[in-house]
């Protein structure tokens, strides 16, 4: 029957093994996230910022689309 000191020694060995595995996983995560240029915690997407000229072009294109739809509905 194992003594308490044997059990403690086995648990410490397992803990050390697990810590080494975690360090390897952290290194792998760090390497992969550096390849993509994103951090692992960057899950928040930011809205794109458009210039005033780009917004005006988008607005004009949308108005043209709606005008086309309205003209087709009147026929």
Image (cartoon, grey):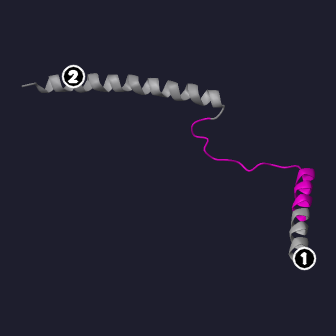
Residue in the foreground of this view, choosing between 20 and 35: 35
Q: Quadrant of the N terminus?
A: top left
Residue 58, above or below 19? below
Horizontally, residue 24 falls left or right of residue 72, namely: left
Q: Residue 2: x, y in percent?
A: 10, 24
Q: Which residues are magenta?
A: 39-63
Residue in the foreground of this view, choosing between 24 and 11: 24
Q: Earlier in the sequence, mark 2 or mark 1?
A: 2
- Image disc number at residue 24: none
Task: Please give the name of the residue rendered at 67% of the width and 47% of the height, measured from the top-left corner.
Answer: 45
Picture quarter containing residue 11? Answer: top left
* Residue that numbered label 1 is attached to: 75
Q: Residue 67: x, y in percent?
A: 91, 68
Q: Residue 18: x, y in percent?
A: 35, 26
Within 10 angstroms of label 2, few (less than 14), some, or many (20 or more) residues? few
Q: Residue 38: x, y in percent?
A: 64, 35
Q: CA distance from mark 2 to mark 1?
A: 86 Å
Horizontally, residue 6 falls left or right of residue 72, namely: left
- Image disc number at residue 9: 2
Task: Please give the name of the residue rendered at 86% of the width and 69% of the height, measured from the top-left corner.
Answer: 69
* Residue 44 within the magenta-colored segment of the rendering: yes
Picture quarter containing residue 34? Answer: top right
Task: Please give the name of the residue rendered at 38% of the width and 25% of the height, measured from the top-left corner.
Answer: 19
Task: Please give the name of the residue rendered at 53% of the width and 29% of the height, measured from the top-left corner.
Answer: 29
């Amino acid at each position: 029957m194992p003594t308490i000191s044997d059990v403690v020694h086995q648990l410490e060995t397992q803990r050390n093994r697990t810590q080494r595995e975690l360090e390897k996983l952290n290194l792998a995560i760090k390497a992969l996230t550096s390849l993509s240029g994103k951090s692992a915690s960057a899950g928040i997407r930011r809205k794109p910022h458009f210039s005033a000229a780009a917004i005006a072009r988008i607005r004009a294109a949308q108005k043209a689309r709606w005008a086309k739809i309205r003209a087709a509905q009147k026929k």
